[in-house]
């Protein structure tokens, strides 16, 4: 048992950092548990070190290929893949945001009646629980190969992301403003338009920009499962060990993401 | 000026000047035109017959996928364990690497704003903008397929995410505490461990758990490109059109995602 800590106890004793977890027993149990898990995890991994060692040359080759990017030899594939990725991003963001606004309104407990609230929350939960890639696999199986499946996947994923955050923002809005509009005798649509919308629009714009960014990044992998975009070109480049083409594609992706991030920073600063 | 004469002595008011209105109208026009053009591009490459046929296909797949083949569960325990390991070990490695990057990227702790900070920011943006599936593709080409490639892919992808959130937390610390520790004559290392680290520890723990949750989701699909985990089973079941197995795996993935989200919400709730 620990002694009670009085001032006379503390005087003349050097200060020691208080432990992060108070209970000694819990501390040791957590440490031993973590160590045991780590040991089990590390030992269960089979690493073929010889293969890794052999691969190091190829890794070095990949890293040096960033110095000699090859945009030219597959320029057509890169261009059409990128264009398809961007097209999917634009359409999916527009449609996804347009759908997620009503769902976000419905999922805010302070403005939606209970049945609608439950339905909208259900839609959000389903959309968030399913991985983009898995949705894409299913949609490719149903709708066939091509950007339509990718567009639907990204729209669906956008709904879960944006509606949830929008609903949370609406739930934490200032009630007084909305009530003031109500008190003027406004209709429901006017109430939303003048009482709620001005309060949430800055955050909605910020989130929308962020989601466009995410959609572009995701559209780069959907091609792996046949849902259109640059992913298929990238996959081919890796499979054929054409690292300079792959590096060129990666540089383009990073460049576009950086540009989008910069743009969203500018837009958010202007809106807020 | 948004004020204009009405003819008699009164003045009329509009929200925007005519030029601003025109600019906004043009902006909307361009936006809508871009969307329509993008949609047409998608529509051109879509085989609409498949789309009209989609409800029947969806029903067909659903009929094939139910009921799930529960006996296949025996083959899934090891992949589930691998998936958990990929996420956990990947997160741990990422955190080890993200901490120094974050300290180098934060304005108040970086050794040099001109030389070191841009490099750290470049590491953050480039690891963040490339999806873990692409990292996995690359690593499989370099070090061969397997769980190890998955771990490294998750680790690299998570560096940027963790370091970005962490450096934002470091930039928001209270300088008074740092100054107080410095005033006692502490060495830079002591300032770090007594002045900065206690302030960012809650944020750090939150980021770690949050990223672990995301990594569980991502590691479930890494197997699609051959990087180990339950995705391998998913991809082989898809390739053999074993729909009852696919539905079982999807249920397992859904459960894993829900459980990890629940765990991370609990831990984050306990920290904050």
Image: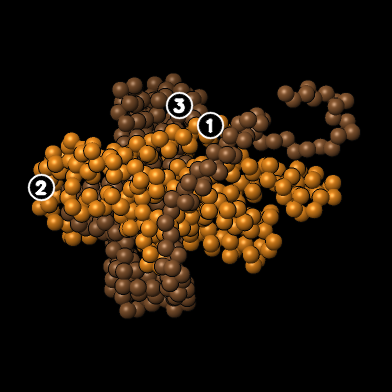
- First in sequence: mark 2 vs mark 1: 2
Name chain B's colour. orange
Extreme-right residue of the structure: A12
Which residue sits at x=67%, y=42%?
B199
Q: Which residue is mark 3?
A: A178
Q: Which chain is brown?
A: A
Residue B53 circle label = 2
Say what secondary structure mark 2 lies in: loop
Q: Dot 1 surroundings within 10 Å: few (below 14), some, or many (20 or more)?
A: few
In this view, the residue in front, A168 or B72, is B72
**Scheme of image coloration:** by chain
Q: Which residue is mark 1?
A: B269
Q: Chain of mark 1?
A: B
Same subunit: marks 2 and 1:
yes
Which residue sits at x=32%, y=58%?
B225
What is the CA distance from the residue labelled 3 to the residue labelled 2? 46 Å
Residue B97, located in which quarter of the rendered image?
Answer: bottom right
What is the CA distance from the residue labelled 2 to the residue labelled 1? 47 Å
């Amino acid at each position: 048992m620990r002694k009670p800590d009085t001032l006379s106890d503390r005087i003349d004793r050097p200060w020691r950092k208080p432990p992060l977890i108070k209970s000694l027993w819990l501390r040791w149990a957590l440490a031993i548990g973590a160590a045991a898990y780590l040991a089990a995890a590390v030992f269960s991994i089979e690493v073929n070190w010889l293969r890794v060692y052999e691969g190091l040359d190829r890794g070095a080759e990949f890293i040096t290929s960033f110095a000699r990017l090859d945009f030219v030899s597959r320029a057509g594939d890169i261009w059409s893949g990128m264009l398809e990725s961007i097209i999917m991003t634009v359409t999916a963001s527009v449609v996804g945001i347009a759908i997620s606004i009503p769902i976000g309104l419905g999922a805010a407990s302070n403005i939606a009646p209970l049945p609608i609230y439950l339905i909208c929350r259900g839609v959000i939960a389903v959309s968030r629980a399913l991985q983009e890639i898995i949705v894409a696999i299913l949609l490719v199986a149903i709708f066939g190969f091509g950007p339509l499946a990718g567009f639907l996947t990204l729209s669906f994923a956008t709904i879960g992301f944006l509606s949830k955050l929008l609903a949370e923002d609406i739930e934490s809005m200032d009630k007084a403003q909305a009530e003031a509009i109500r008190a003027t005798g406004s209709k429901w649509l006017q109430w939303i338009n003048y009482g709620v919308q001005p309060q949430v629009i800055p955050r909605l714009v910020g989130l929308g920009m962020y989601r466009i960014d995410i959609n572009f990044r995701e559209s780069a992998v959907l091609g792996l499962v046949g849902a259109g975009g640059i992913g298929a070109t990238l996959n081919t480049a890796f499979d054929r060990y054409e690292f300079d083409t792959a590096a060129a594609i990666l540089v383009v992706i990073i460049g576009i993401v950086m540009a989008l991030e910069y743009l969203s920073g500018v837009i958010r600063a202007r809106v807020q | 000026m948004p004020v204009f004469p009405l003819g008699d002595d009164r003045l009329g008011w509009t929200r925007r000047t005519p030029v601003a209105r025109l600019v906004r109208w043009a902006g909307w026009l361009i936006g809508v035109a871009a969307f329509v053009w993008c949609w047409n591009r998608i529509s051109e490459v879509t085989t609409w017959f498949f789309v009209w046929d989609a409800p029947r296909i969806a029903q067909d797949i659903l009929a094939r996928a139910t009921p799930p083949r529960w006996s296949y569960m025996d083959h899934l325990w090891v992949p589930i364990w691998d998936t958990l390991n990929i996420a956990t070990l990947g997160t741990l490695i990422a955190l080890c690497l993200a901490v120094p990057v974050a300290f180098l990227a934060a304005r108040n702790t970086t050794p040099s704003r001109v030389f070191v900070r841009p490099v750290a920011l470049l590491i953050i943006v480039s690891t963040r903008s490339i999806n873990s599936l692409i990292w996995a593709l690359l690593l499989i080409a370099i070090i061969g397929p397997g769980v190890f490639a998955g771990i490294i892919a998750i680790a690299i992808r998570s560096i940027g995410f963790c370091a970005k959130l962490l450096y934002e937390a470091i930039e928001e610390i209270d300088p008074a505490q740092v100054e107080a520790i410095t005033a006692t004559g502490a060495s830079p290392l002591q300032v770090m461990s007594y002045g900065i680290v206690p302030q960012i520890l809650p944020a750090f723990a939150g980021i770690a758990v949050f990223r672990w949750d995301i990594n569980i989701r991502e590691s479930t699909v890494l197997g699609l490109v051959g990087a180990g985990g339950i995705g391998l089973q998913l991809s082989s079941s898809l390739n053999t059109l074993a729909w009852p197995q696919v539905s079982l795996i999807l249920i397992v993935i859904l459960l894993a995602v829900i459980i990890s989200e629940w765990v991370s919400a609990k831990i984050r709730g306990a920290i904050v």
